[in-house]
Amino acid sequence: MTVLDRRSLIIAGAGLALFDPSARAAPGPTPRVGSPAPDFTATDSDGKPVTLSSLRGKLVVLEWTNDGCPFVQKWYGAGAMQALQREAAGLGAVWLSVISSAPGEQGAADGARANLLTAERKAAPAHVLLDPTGALGRLYDAQTTPHMFVVGKDGVLGYMGGADSVASTKPEDLPRAKPYVRNAIVALAAGQKVTDAVTRPYGCTVKYSA
């Protein structure tokens, strides 16, 4: 890992300063669990518009991602994110992977590259949303990759935070971690209250445009 990569790592909310402040989202309204999730229209990797409000009645998972981030590589290299995507789909959820890296930054992707990554990693999102301007990421105050949000069938934000409880790049740590986002998906799919509805996201800073 380069010096620049090390500076770009962040455990959001943990009081650590190992990140580049210029990569943080611009200040703005912060989404709140228990309130309606911010609506948006974004273009997916096939050039099709995806609007959150059109998915009302379905569980929606938002996953901020960056294939160059070692925390993301842990999840995909172990097959854990792909397994979770398929489990969520089996529960009727719509999984939206979001790429908010600006052009020229780590993890940036056009539609063709995003589709290639999906195929190579055998990933299973319903859509990969391209957000090169960072508008969607800033709307949700997405800070890290991964940073996870789960929207209930009623359009209310039910979970926001980390993928799990262990801020690590080591795949062997996955089994011992508390699976925050999986627990949230299962609970919301069953119409139950989410335990640990707000947690600290961890990973690499989202590589927003300046």
Image (cartoon, rainbow, N blue to C red):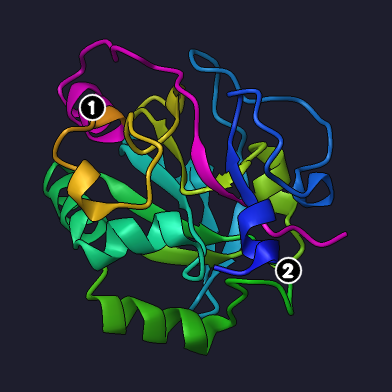
**What residue lies at 81% left-to-right and 62% top-to-bottom?**
209
Task: Name which residue type carries label 1.
Answer: Lys
Was residue 77 drawn as part of the magenta stretch in this picture? Answer: no
Few, some or many C-alpha atoms within 10 Å of disc 2 (few <14, some 14-19, many ≥20)?
many
State left or right for residue 179 relative to residue 96: left
Q: Which mark is residue 102?
A: 2
**What residue lies at 62% left-to-right and 25% top-to-bottom?**
31
Q: Which residue has dot 1 on it?
A: 178
Examine the image and state in which quarter residue 119 appears.
bottom left
- Residue 33 visible here: yes
Camera-side residue: 83 or 67?
A: 67
Camera-side residue: 172 or 120?
A: 172
Few, some or many C-alpha atoms within 10 Å of disc 1 (few <14, some 14-19, many ≥20)?
few
- Residue range of the region highlighted in magenta in the rendering: 181-210
Q: Is residue 152 above or below residue 76?
A: above
Element assignment for label 2: loop
State left or right for residue 127 relative to residue 206: left
**What residue lies at 73% left-to-right and 68% top-to-bottom?**
102
Was residue 186 drawn as part of the magenta stretch in this picture? Answer: yes
- Mark 2 or 1, closer to the camera: 1
Element assignment for label 1: loop
Dot 2 or dot 1, earlier in sequence: 2
Q: CA distance from mark 2 to mark 1?
A: 31 Å
